[in-house]
Image: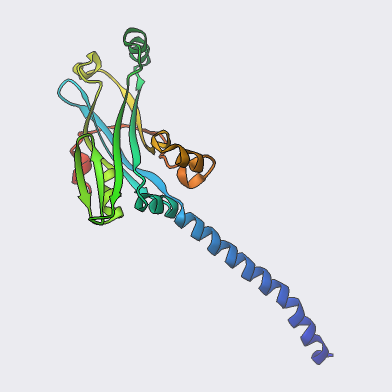
Amino acid sequence: MLKSSMPARHAQSQPRLLMLALLCMGWLLCAWVWADAGDIKVQKAEASFGDNRIEIAAKFDVSLSNDLQEALKNGLSLTFVYEFQLTRPRIYSWYRQVSDGFGPNAMLSYQLSYHALTRQYRLHIGSFYRNFQSVNDALAALGIVRNWGVLNDSSLARDRNTDFAGKVRLKLDRSRLPKTYQLTAFGHEEWQLESPWVELSKARPEDITSNE
């Protein structure tokens, strides 16, 4: 009886081993997909009163999917945008919208490109640019903003006793992509690259650099 039961037990264990192997393969596949997907994660986001303006300092961890890195190396320029929104005081936000015709918001654009001739990545901020040897170095620089002035010469910025609050995020601006790439980006998660909105804490902008 003992000898005849051993093959049966072995046969019963095979489906379990197969299920375990399939689970491991599924986990590895998910890990590979997650590793390939790009992401933007916030590390710090702080604001302080500057010279007649509010100054923002923030740090984000930025990574690109393999598809985005390949498109970048093939000559596609990627535009990333920092966005700021004032959330308090709400009455001031409403007043600015009515009196000025726009909300108390601000944007700051960065453009990332790759130059095959020099094999360098270039990060543009307006007319200023920097070159980097690797995409990781370029993304590290892209993810840091310091002394970004918003609400310049506003009554809110001049009154340092005002209790204000705002939020900021960083995202890939898909509207700046060529039309063919916009179609590619539509519905593809690896192209939907943006951080969540994060509330600004009150601190001096230089505090963010001392903890890097």
User: Residue drawn at (35%, 53%), measured in percent from left and top?
Assistant: 73
Is 41 left or right of 114, judged from the image as shown? right
The residue furthest right is 1
Front residue of 89 and 176: 176
**137 relative position to 178: left or right:** left
Image x and y of residue 201, in percent = 30, 33
Task: State the image quarter where residue 105 is shown.
Answer: top left
User: How many numbered marks, from 0 up?
Assistant: 0
Percent position (x, y) of residue 209?
20, 44
Q: Residue at x 51, y 56 (%)?
A: 33
Snapshot quadrant of residue 178: top left
Q: Position of residue 155 (x, y in %)?
A: 23, 13
Of all residues, the one furthest to the left in this rendering is: 51
Q: Is residue 148 above or below residue 116?
A: above
For the rendered model, the colour scheme is rainbow
In the image, what residue occupies the spot 20% across and 22% down? 53
Residue in front for this viewpoint, 207 or 72: 72
Does residue 136 lie above or below 148 as drawn?
below
Q: Quadrant of the N terminus?
A: bottom right
Quarter of the rendering containing residue 7: bottom right
Q: Does 204 sit left or right of 88 as displayed?
A: left
| Residue 76: image location, x then y, percent | 36, 46
Residue nearest the viewer, comparing 211 with 98: 98
